[in-house]
Image (spheres, rainbow, N blue to C red):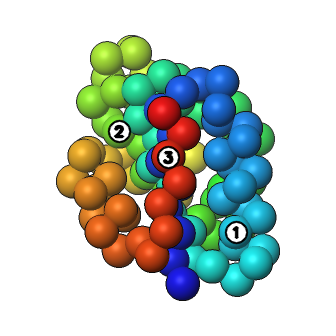
Amino acid sequence: MRACVVVSVAADLEDAVALAAALVRAGLEVSVFAMSDAVAALADRRDLQTQLVDVDADVAICASSAHQRGLGGDAFLADIVRGSQDDHARMVAHADRVVSFS
């Protein structure tokens, strides 16, 4: 089973990451897409980036949201995709369940 966690609200980032990690531990394939203010929050939290990468979640951030907030390529770990709403749509389309923090 595949799950997708979408997060756009900075205040929800920790909960979204905790849920994604728990879903992986439960045996699901998990993708995470961060957009809007959650992108800036994730850029400031290398520990949360590392947690997502370490559990093998498929992680992407909205590059447009990052650009609008002045975030460069070095703000995110190399394993985190700088993507677009196309990546968001792909993740949602391939998921059996979607949880959105928006």
Question: Amino acid under label 2?
Answer: Cys
Residue assigned mark 1: 23
Secondary structure beneath label 3: strand
Of marks 3 and 1, the one in the foreground: 3
Disc number placed over residue 49 in the picture, else none:
none
Q: Position of residue 31 (x, y in %)?
A: 50, 63
The answer to the question of whether label 2 and label 3 lie on touching residues, with beta carbons closer than 8 A, is no
Of marks 2 and 1, the one in the foreground: 1
Given residues 78 and 44, the one toward you in this image is 44
Residue 45 lies left or right of residue 64; in this view the side is right
Which residue is found at the position 42% from the left and 72% from the top?
A: 95
* Gap between marks 2 and 1 measured at Cα: 22 Å
Residue 77 lies left or right of residue 87; in this view the side is right
* Gap between marks 3 and 1 measured at Cα: 14 Å
Residue assigned mark 2: 62
Given residues 65 and 100, the one toward you in this image is 100
The answer to the question of whether label 3 and label 1 lie on touching residues, with beta carbons closer than 8 A, is no
Of marks 2 and 3, the one in the foreground: 3
Question: Amino acid under label 3?
Answer: Ser
